[in-house]
Image: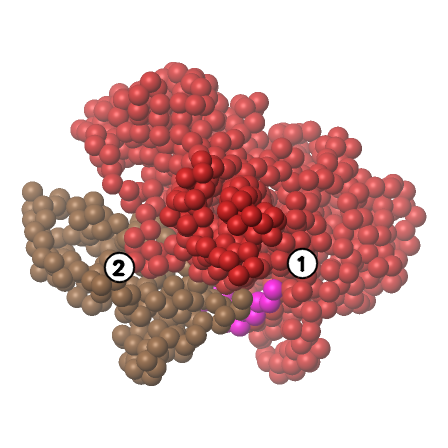
Chain colours: A red, B brown
Amino acid sequence: MDGDLKARNRTVGAALRHDSARKHTTGEAAYADDLPEPPGLLHAALVPSPVAHGRILDLDLSPALAVPGVVMALGPADIPGKNDISSSGRSVEPLFAEGLVEHWGQTLALVLAETRDAALLGARAVRPRIEALVPVLRIEEALERQQLLLPPMVMARGDAQAALAAAPRRLSGEFRCGGQEHFYLEGQIAIAIPGEDGEQTVISSTQHPTEVQHIVSRVLGCDYNRITVECRRMGGGFGGKESNASWIAAAAALGARATGRPVKLRLPRKADIAATGKRHPFLYRFDVGFDDTGRVLALDATLAADGGHTLDLSGGVIMRAVTHALNCYDVPDVRITGLVAKTNTVSNTAFRGFGGPQGALLMEEVLHRVAAATAQHVDAARERNFAGGPNGGETPYGQPLEGDLIRRVWAEAKADARIEQRRAEIAAFNAAHPYLRRGLGGFALAFGISFGLLHLNQAGALVHVYTDGSIRLNHGGTEMGQGLFIKVAQVVAEVFGVPIERVGITRTSTAEVPNTAPTAASTGSDLNGWAAHAAASAIRGRMAEVAAEQWNVPADEIRFEDGLVRHGNRAMEFGDLAELCWKKRVSLSATGFYRTPDLSWDPVAMKGRPFFYFSYGAAFAEVVVDTLTGEHRVLAADLVQDCGRSLNPAIDRGQIEGGFVQGLGWLTCEELWWDKEGRLRTLGPSTYKIPGSRDVPPALRVRLLDSAPARVETIFRSKAVGEPPLLLATAVWNALRDATGLAALDLPATPERVLMALRAKG
Amino acid sequence: MPQVNLTVNGRSHTVEVEGRTLLVELLREKLRLTGTHVGCDTSQCGACVVHIDGESVKSCTTLALQCEGASVTTIEGLAKPDGTLHIMQEAFREYHALQCGFCTPGMVMSAIDLVQKHPEGLTERQIREGLEGNLCRCTGYHNIVKAIAAAAEVMHGKRDTLRPAEVMAAG
């Protein structure tokens, strides 16, 4: 495989628009709810649990049936297959609660009606009788009761306890971060359309069509080949449609199976927030040993995630948190223990970064504490502890980091942000102002790219060339706005040397490319780009043979460029060669397959090479804090992000800007709030605050790291960009501490929390 | 069932609605104008913004019956019949001011109203403040603000064409 392909045709590397840019601005881009409704369509609504924890005594669905327009109501007894929606198929994660309810808003039943309003009214009419039990809502409480969803996950190197004992200085700490609601603008939706012989076509807003297929099949008790799942686009995903889309689709499919009619399930926003998983909140406890220079020598830390009531994807999330707990820093003797606590809250799930953002917070806290204890600036402590150079260059799990890139992104971000000058300006401002305080915070990142579950690192593509030279591209990746479809189309256009307009982009379908991985873990373009490259290259190879035979020249001298096929002075249109291939009975269709090479992982020893490569980044953010109210604003941010040799700088830049702002929301303004009964009371944008246009830094300066092609064979030496930039927002947390001088500041650092911390400090 | 008479994108319609039918339901379900989206149901996210008699309004909390005699413009009504985009649409497209696209129609409708209400010109700060009622979860708003600033220059007659987008020139 030629990983060092240079983009000859310059389609790859061009800042092309999003494939649907025009349609997005005209309203023509159709999301699932915009499609014409099939005749006979029924609408579905979920019956939610009114309590967070309890025994179901009686679930009488007849009040729903009394509502005009309601056609049917379905509970656990109506499931023909298994009442299990777990990704693994090995956990107990029911579609409809049976016996016990374990979180407020958990789905008990499904109501089907002629209109959506009737379905919602029908669902509301159901009054389940539940004997309430005491809910466990906090991580601490779950840990005390030893309520864990997984055995502890321990990553260790050396002897952390002995090194702590031997370290010249030592301190310990505890802090926490909150969860995060995805708030994709398009809520969860699926439309199930029954066909012949038990077949169903399921249109799903999903990042993982194959898992939708599997879980629909499991719930219905049918073969996978009965179910076709399609997704043209999502109105945002962010991890929230990785596993959660599957059970929404399974509920719709169950309704379609029971009634023989098409069923649409579109969750109202409140129901969506109540019933679907979120980012895992974390509790951290650590002991750190260090010397007077601020070099961290030993670290023993526990990262406890709130998994919610079931496992879902928490195993992967905690693995990524643990493997990212040292981020880009070296600690010689280390033990990181990952726990997943079981609470009576909605089951937490994938969210952009997948535990990585939570893991990377640990060293920020550690370095701040160590820097304070050794009377140095936190950035000096950072530089003292970067992996590589004079320090160790390997992660505790045994994979090398590129110390030179860590130092390079850090140095470039510092230079971009002009930090010496800014610090002087900030000091002058703070000295002059009675109560506003400015601060500057930095952050550096090494983020591992690949799925932690090794077998997910595979992708397929299906490419057809038609006899007019137009190309049809299909692959297993899904489009949620991130620009995957245009990036993969750029790869295909590059291979054939044709203008991008010749490549037709099509919806994702399990009927075209089967057995796919989710579009997640930032791997969409890495995996699907290579798979599409393989398919296109196979066809190009056959086409080259035909051209070579026609011109009586060697096939490897045939060039595909500018929409032409060339040898020396001879040329023909790409479409003419396609037509010639057909006449010569040469196939113009191919599948492509890719699996990420050189990965290994021992989950017991927690050693190996789980990541194909690392994505590096660094950031500085400047904030201003009103110390009388706790309110704060980000004034400016300078970001440097490693995208390798970017496939599309415009798309990548958009990911960096958007990821940073989403991280900013998680760390500063987005707060999930449960009452004592375990009811989530932040069910919409009026109570759950995501960043608005006034909350983002007016000066957001983004730079792609220049001249830094990936050092492994990624597609055209590009690097993934979906998740890493979200973590760059950690600089804002650090800036808030710089501005306020607070030694501890739990997350999210809302104005209330900042104010309370300032009051406590006195 | 009551009827409402209204003009949508220049065409007059008489539509039977329930008293509780929302304008967005009339547009999406009765007229099949599905470019107007429902994001939050509670009029904070702005994905449902349309113009009623030239003013931006959240159609998810407007009753259809309130629109008797009104002239409604939706995202589908902005481009010319020959497909030429409104300059605001063109700016969003050109500046990569969109990712998943779900908020885009509402953003564009709000942005046009905002620019029209400020014939004197708009600062980036005013744009950020004016967009408060439209949420975007993907872009971080950076390119949206730039796109609106660029379109405003054209709408205000300060330039004939859009200022070239830095983001697209980057490659």
Front residue of A649/A423: it is A649
Q: Amino acid at mark 1?
A: Pro
- Count the labels in the image: 2
Q: Position of residue A258 (x, y in %)?
A: 31, 20
- Span of residues in magenta: A692-704
Going by the image, does B38 lie left or right of A429? left
Q: Position of residue B26 (x, y in %)?
A: 18, 49
Rendered-image quadrant of the N terminus of chain B: top left
Mark 1 touches mark 2? (CB < 8 Å): no
Which numbered dot is residue A733? Answer: none
Front residue of A681/A618: it is A618
Q: Amino acid at mark 2?
A: Ile
Q: Say above or below: A143 vs A634.
A: above
Which numbered dot is residue B75? Answer: 2
Magenta span has A702?
A: yes
Is residue B7 in view from this perspective?
yes
Is residue A662 in view from this perspective?
no
Residue found at x 65% / y 40%: A596
Residue found at x 76% / y 52%: A401
User: Closer to us: mark 1 or mark 2?
Assistant: 1
Going by the image, does A591 lie left or right of B5? right
Going by the image, does A41 lie left or right of A306? left
Question: What chain is tagged by disc 1?
Answer: A
Where does label 1 land, which residue? A709
Rendered-image quadrant of the C terminus of chain B: bottom right
Residue found at x 27% / y 66%: B84
